[in-house]
Image (cartoon, rainbow, N blue to C red):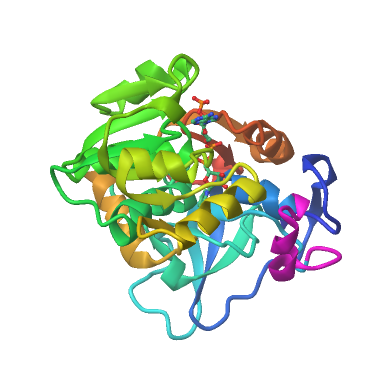
């Protein structure tokens, strides 16, 4: 099978399309014929081995895992022992944070997959796993958002942010979204009640107060969280130094400020699938690349100005229509 592989750390140019053995399904896993992937900042962090401490998980001197890629959507081709609830031919989506998704076939733990809802396609659902799970878990598991609360989302137009605006609205929150001027109309179309363009208004001098502040971009200071919020969640970070500085100040304060790494699980993926099926959430796909241009897709999202998501598609000739 074709796969996008790496044997050293580096930029998208080191990714190669190579012939690899088709993976063998193991206990608890699904073998999936991949129809579409999406690109996430995690892909280029893992590709580059940055920040450096990530290499303790992904390989100190060179990558432990050869095939890149986390988000996928496709068709179940084989089912490992002790997997229940799936059949060959099911259309599924899921996440492989250790890699392996940028390939014609991938083996994924069944508990990190869910079924594609009726009426949705592979491209749409490949856009969901990491960004959708992060948005959902920031709001619910960690942010404890309640209906009627006010939320400020800093970085509202990207992969995580555009899901977060829609999910927060679906959960009955009043949403203030922060993005660049060029994305104001987009974020309003997602349902944001108020929009702050960070390139015309200084968010670090904004004085309104919100129940919850979620920072997906990662440039808010501890003082920003404390001034604008009753509680806060950090999702992304701009520099490690800034992130550590915010956490250090939090350690000497009673302000409720959390950070987390999103976890893939069937329950949360199914919640996202239900929200999409109910048309309360719609993945926005800015660009679609053919699989042969996966390195170009990664290079594009590295600029960190994606509107919604970037998706890559495999050979659609073999994909049955839903
Ligand atoms: N904790 C976790 O488990 C987890 C999971 C997924 C992602 N993340 C992290 O979350 C971050 C966002 O991920 P993503 O997939 O949403 O990335 P993305 O799709 O590249 O989106 C980045 C967004 O940041 C916005 N942005 C850029 N400069 C900004 C500024 N000065 N102020 C406010 N917003 C600004 C951009 O909007 P404009 O184009 O309008 O500027 C863009 O929409 C990344 O750092 C990623 O590593 C963390």
> Measured from the top left, where is residue 7 in percent x and y?
85, 59
Of residues 137 and 227, the one drawn nearer to the viewer in this rendering: 227
Of residues 112 and 233, the one drawn nearer to the viewer in this rendering: 233
Q: Is residue 98 magenta?
A: no
- Which residue occupies 42% across, 79% down? 83
- Residue 281 visible in the snapshot: no
Q: Is 74 placed above or below 227 here?
A: below
Q: Residue furthest left?
A: 148
In the shown orientation, is residue 244 left or right of residue 210?
right
> Quadrant where the C terminus lies?
top left
> Measured from the top left, where is residue 199 in percent x and y?
50, 17
Q: Quadrant of residue 149?
A: top left
> Measured from the top left, where is residue 109 in percent x and y?
50, 72
In the shown orientation, is residue 199 left or right of residue 174?
right
Q: Is residue 52 magenta?
A: yes
Of residues 107 and 195, the one drawn nearer to the viewer in this rendering: 195
Range drawn in magenta: 48-63
> Quadrant where the N terminus lies?
bottom right
Q: Quadrant of residue 191?
A: top left
> Measured from the top left, where is residue 253 in percent x and y?
41, 58
In the shown orientation, is residue 2 left or right of residue 317?
right
Q: Residue furthest front?
A: 252
């Amino acid at each position: 099978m074709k796969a996008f592989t790496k044997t050293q750390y580096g930029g998208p140019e080191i990714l190669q399309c190579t012939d690899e053995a088709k993976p063998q399904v193991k206990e608890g896993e699904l073998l999936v014929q991949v129809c579409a992937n999406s690109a996430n900042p995690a892909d280029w962090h893992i590709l580059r081995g940055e920040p450096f401490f990530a290499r303790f998980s992904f390989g100190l001197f060179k990558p432990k895992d050869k095939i890149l890629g986390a988000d996928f959507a496709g068709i179940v081709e084989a089912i490992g022992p002790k997997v229940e609830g799936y059949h060959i031919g099911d259309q599924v989506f899921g996440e492989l944070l250790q890699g392996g998704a940028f390939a014609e076939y991938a083996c994924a733990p069944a508990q990190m997959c869910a079924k594609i809802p009726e009426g949705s396609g592979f491209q749409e659902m490949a856009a969901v796993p990491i960004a959708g799970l992060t948005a959902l878990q920031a709001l619910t598991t960690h942010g404890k958002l309640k209906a009627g609360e006010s939320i400020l989302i800093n970085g509202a137009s990207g992969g995580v942010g555009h899901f977060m605006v829609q999910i927060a609205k679906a959960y009955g929150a009043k949403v203030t979204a922060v993005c660049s001027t060029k994305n104001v109309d987009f974020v309003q179309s997602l349902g944001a009640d108020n929009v702050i363009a960070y390139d015309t208004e200084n968010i670090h001098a904004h004085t309104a107060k919100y129940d919850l502040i979620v920072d997906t971009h990662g440039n808010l200071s501890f003082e920003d969280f404390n001034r604008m919020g009753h509680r806060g969640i950090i999702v992304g970070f701009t520099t490690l130094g800034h992130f550590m500085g915010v956490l250090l100040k939090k350690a000497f304060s009673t302000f409720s400020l959390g950070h987390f790494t999103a976890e893939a699980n069937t329950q949360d993926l199914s919640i996202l699938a239900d929200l999409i099926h109910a048309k309360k959430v719609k993945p926005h796909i800015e660009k679609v690349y053919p699989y042969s241009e996966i390195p170009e897709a990664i290079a594009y999202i590295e600029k960190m100005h994606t509107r919604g998501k970037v998706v890559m598609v495999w050979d659609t000739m073999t994909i049955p229509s839903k």
